[in-house]
Image: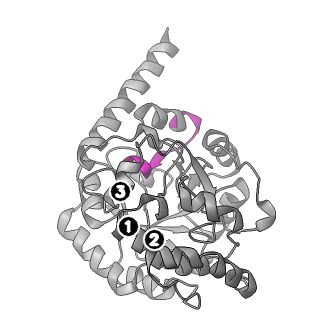
Amino acid sequence: MSPTALNDLSRFPIVQAPMAGGASCPELVGAVCGAGALGFLAGGYKTAGGLYQEIKRVRTLTARPFGVNLFMPQDGRPADPAAVEVYRHQLAGEATWYETPLGETDDSRDDAYDAKLAILLEDPVPVVSFTFGCPAKETFHAFDRVGTYTIVTVTSADEALAAERAGADAVCVQGVEAGGHQGTYRDDPADEGAPGTGLLTLVTQVREAVALPIVAAGGIMRGAQIAAVLAAGADAAQLGTAFLPCPESGAHPLHKRALTDPLFTRTALTRAFSGRPARGLVNRFVREHGPYAPAAYPEVHHLTAPLRKAAATAGDAQGMALWAGQGHRLARELPAGQLVEVLAAELDTALSGLAHRSAS
């Protein structure tokens, strides 16, 4: 693929982030693509068959290019069983409160990765992206043969270099401001407490390290911010939290309302719900369990899944995983297509202003 192919995928340099857990449903993807941006299905936490059905549904909603995101298998040794068991005991009160048993932690660690790859190679989609690691060169060669554009989520210049060497077509540069899971290749507890790198700095670092096209992600909610990351060297901007409150989004209504609810004043990176650092609104569950959650993904994800479901059913936002980026208070409750149009207009205004100032 040529470096310019990324911008050939959509009318506007706007990408709707793949948000696992139900938010990035076919209806959202179809509306985003139809408005001229690039929509993404989230393949994480789905069965291979479930993902295939969602792909089929998207194809009935839009003829425009769209993407599918996959979680990379978790390499290395499983988490310390003793640490997971301690956390299980710490969550016993939650299980009693919500009247539901905790989940089993011996589930697969590969998220049906091979089966999903097989589907995407047999019946290709325009774009496939990867999170939590970088595939082998052979995987990129296989997607290149079927004409699929590939993107790897990175959180450092070193990860971007690895993606470039492996054969990725582009990188999604994720700043620390981003909502949901940090897409770092390696989840090392020794890095705990590190402040992380802001998006504009990270885009600049990656731009000087690799020649690949860049999709910038992290806290972007307005067209002027899209203009800023383009000026810093990105080729497109990826927005997730901005699309959460859209009526087409599959996010829970409590999650949508929480984004602008004065009760939730800040976000934080926490392992409380999944065992991997992820940014969400600080609620009771994060405050009470975040400090003690072990580095154990996906074991903790499976452990807390019934609790999160029960909290949502009970209408209790204090027990839900309310993933959100740092710009969540700027969320706008607009139809997805209208939001794309507003963002594009804001981007055009910002770029025209920059051009005017540079000419004067």
Residue corresponding to mark 2? 308
Q: Position of residue 285 (x, y in %)?
A: 55, 62
* Distance in Å between CA atoms under marks 3 and 2: 12 Å
The residue drawn where x is 69% and y is 55% is 156
Asked if the residues shown at circle 1 and circle 3 are in contact, with their CB atoms under 8 angstroms apart, the answer is yes
* Distance in Å between CA atoms under marks 2 and 1: 6 Å
The residue drawn where x is 58% and y is 87% is 105
| Quarter holding residue 339 | top left
Asked if the residues shown at circle 2 and circle 1 are in contact, with their CB atoms under 8 angstroms apart, the answer is yes
**Label 2 amino acid?**
Arg
Name the disc covering residue 312, or none.
1
Instruction: Choose between 259 and 93: the one closer to the eye.
Output: 93
Residue corresponding to mark 3? 254
Residue range corresponding to the magenta coloring: 230-244
Residue 118 makes an appearance in the image: yes
Instruction: Choose between 10 and 86: the one closer to the eye.
Output: 86
As drawn, is 242 to the left or to the right of 88? Answer: left
The tag earlier along the polypeptide, 3 or 2, is: 3
The residue drawn where x is 62% and y is 78% is 136
Against 167, is 202 above or below? above
* Distance in Å between CA atoms under marks 1 and 3: 8 Å
Residue count near mark 1 (Cα–Cα under 10 Å), binned few <14, some 14–19, many ≥20: some
Q: Position of residue 291 (x, y in %)?
A: 70, 62
| Quarter holding residue 152 | bottom right
The residue drawn where x is 73% and y is 58% is 158
| Quarter holding residue 134 | bottom right
Asked if the residues shown at circle 3 and circle 2 are in contact, with their CB atoms under 8 angstroms apart, the answer is no
Against 10, is 41 above or below? below
